[in-house]
Amino acid sequence: MTASQTPQTTPATEAEATAGGDSARSNRLRRLAAISSITLAATLVGSKLVAELLTGSVAVLSTLLDSIADLAASMITMICVSRSIRPPTRSFRYGQGKAEPLSALGQSAFIGASGIFILVDAGGRFIDPQPIERAGIGIGVMILALVLTAAVVLFQRHVVKVTDSPAIEADSLNFTGDLVTGVSVLAALVLVELTHVLWLDPLVATGVALFLLRNAAMIGRDAVGMLLDRELPAEERERIFEIVRGQPQVKDLHDVRSRRAGTHRFIELHLEIDGQLSLSEAHTIAHRVEAALLSDFPDADVLIHQEPAGLKDARLDNRLAVG
């Protein structure tokens, strides 16, 4: 192949190639995290069901219901992650990244429903306390659950750090909550066994329920924000302005819009450059700006509109409401 036949690469295409490799790794990690979540939830449902049947503890029942909700939510996460990593198609030209916040919203609903059910059941146990039988079995199961959950949470946090996946992040937050509730239930089982104070059991179950409802609200809020195309965080927007304004021959930028769909970011902006430049020169500048943005946001889809600097036209920035 002669020099004239050698394919030419640009900073933007090189950045896109790097992003492609990162994307493949991200997809593998998200699949593995979803599979580990389902495996953990199924294991915990089986072991806690046995413990609840043998002990009759409402606190153990609360964690069993939570694990059942976790299993359903993890299965939804697996389905949604599988869809979100699909490449854009003719029907879904933006990809299907919003399947991930849909998954998080489903998790929020399952967790909230289990929290309400636990509150109702705990209220009945306050009125009619029931003794806990075979507490040792319940204690053993809770210790096993804590160890397994901690291992999965550590792996999920690594995946979230690498992929920034909202679905896996919601799953991780959910299982982190399980660690807190698991420690509480373990303490309740030990205290009831030592003191025979029966109301400690529904008291801990009530605390678990309130904690679950809080987590459901947090997960649901973030999922709805992404589904409604909330802007990227302020620090990321500031970085976009800093990158673009730092490029040679760029006068300024305006009408910057950004959003996330799963792990994918979308960045749109109007680029202000010298109006006397040729179309080819303007394109080169825009391409350089795109490459600079992709170096910091490798998963982003960047759309740049070029304008002569100083042009007085109708701007989105002037029409935005507060909120």
Image: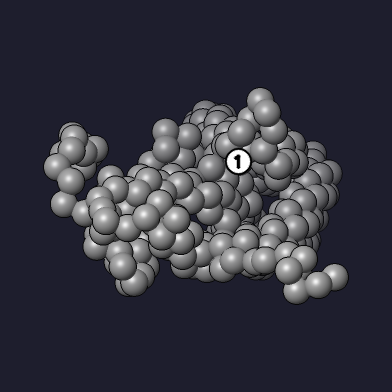
Res. 321 in view: no
| Residue 239 screen position, x and y as percent | 36, 65
Residue position for label 1? 97
Query: The C terminus appears in which quarter of the rendering?
Result: top left
Q: How many marks?
A: 1
- Please state which of residues 261 and 191 is positioned toward the viewer in this rendering: 261
Query: The N terminus appears in which quarter of the rendering?
Result: bottom right
Residue 229, quarter of picture:
top left
Identity of the residue drawn at 16% across and 52% down: 310
| Residue 122 screen position, x and y as percent | 54, 36
Res. 137 in view: yes
Identity of the residue drawn at 34% across and 72% down: 248
Task: Give the side of residue 10 with respect to residue 39, left or right.
Answer: left
- The image shows residue 133, relative to residue 22, as above or below, that is above
Residue 151, quarter of picture:
bottom right
Identity of the residue drawn at 69% across and 33% down: 89
Residue 320, quarter of picture:
top left
- Please state which of residues 185 and 167 is positioned toward the viewer in this rendering: 167
Identity of the residue drawn at 65% across and 66% down: 9
- Please state which of residues 157 and 232 is positioned toward the viewer in this rendering: 232
- The image shows residue 115, relative to residue 16, as above or below, that is above
| Residue 280 screen position, x and y as percent | 45, 56
Kind of residue indicated by mark 1: Gly
| Residue 295 screen position, x and y as percent | 52, 68
Task: Give the side of residue 211 with respect to residue 36, left or right.
Answer: left
Task: Give the side of residue 108 with respect to residue 20, left or right.
Answer: left
- The image shows residue 314, relative to residue 37, as above or below, that is above
Secondary-structure class at tag 1: loop
- Please state which of residues 207 and 268 is positioned toward the viewer in this rendering: 268
